[in-house]
Image: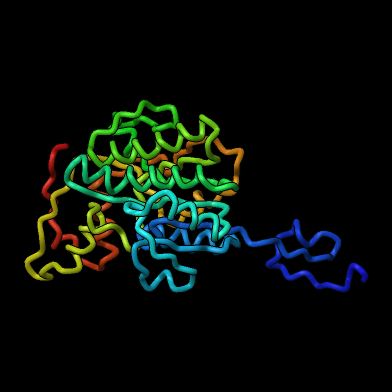
Amino acid sequence: MTDEAIDAPTSVPLAFRARGVVTVPVARRVLVLGATGCRGRELCAAFAADGYEVIAAARGPVGHTHPYRFVPIDVVTADQYELSELLAREGVQVVVNAITGRGGTARAMYEANVRPMENLLAAVRLVTVDPRVVHVGTILEYGSVVTGTTIRENTALRPDSLYAESRLACSRLVLTAIRRGEIDGVVVRLATTIGPYAFLESFLGSLALTLYEMDRVAGIDVPVYNARGDYVDVLDAAAAIVRAAGCPAVDPWVNVGRGIAVEARAMVRCLVRAAGLSPALVRNATRAR
């Protein structure tokens, strides 16, 4: 067989087209927990685009999970043996925890966020071949900072809400397991993600729903905190997580954001404009934070 015998398609990575011979690599397999959420759905798409075989997991399927193999599982109630059997059976090489939950009490936050992480780590310790664990955290774990402060990986962690505290607890579980050599993993702390299918419990998600349902004559008053935040496109965030998953040499925790503080009022104006509404219909009622 000559070098010209195979015409390597341009979609095959250069590393596999050396000397004209195409070697088709074994597809990497990723399990995305929380695949039905706004971040989970974009993670499934990003990993698939990068050549991974995607296994989507959540309590129940939705329309966007149809392109992927779906596994119904509730990581909150599943025990470590059920999860470890899933990891072993599917030959998972990367498992991404994109589960995000809310609740009005510390106990509810624990059940929604920390318990799934505890169950996952216990399961990973049971399998023979450890998958790489990628935990999707949040920069809210650092708490509020003075305007003009750049949040770096070594910034002091001072969460100032039950949600942020529960998310930090998850990150610490993963980082402790990495430090002890029990798992291979990384924590990716994201700035506030923006994009389609936002959580309705989030400020921008609830605002989008309010704008959709609003009276187009009377308008609405929107309570806006006098605050700034870092916002990142959910597609960019998903791409960064894929890179972290495929780079074992990366630091155990990395922050992902734009590094630019944007006023909440400016975000409201952008969303109003995107909705095609007159700014006069949306009146800001500024609140101190």
Measuring from the top left, give residue 215's x and y in whole percent.
10, 69
Which residue is outermost to the left? 218
Taking the image as shown, residue 55 lies to the left or right of residue 226, namely right
Q: Which one is nearer the viewer's eye here, 22 or 195?
A: 22
Q: Is residue 172 above or below residue 43?
A: above
Residue at image coords 21%, 64%: 209
Q: Which one is nearer the viewer's eye here, 54 or 240?
A: 54
Residue at image coords 27%, 42%: 110
Measuring from the top left, give residue 62's x and y in whole percent.
36, 70
Q: Is residue 225 above or below residue 180?
A: below
Which residue is outermost to the front? 81
Residue at image coords 73%, 70%: 9
Q: How is the image coloured?
A: rainbow
Q: Is residue 237 visible?
A: no
Measuring from the top left, give residue 1's x and y in whole percent.
92, 71
Q: Is residue 202 visible?
A: yes
Measuring from the top left, give residue 180's x and y in whole percent.
51, 30
- Residue 13 lies in quadrant: bottom right
Which residue is outermost to the right? 2
> Which quarter of the image is occupied by the C terminus?
top left
Q: Which one is nearer the viewer's eye here, 218 or 124?
A: 124
Residue at image coords 40%, 52%: 98
Taking the image as shown, residue 105 lies to the left or right of residue 172, namely left
The number of discs equals: 0
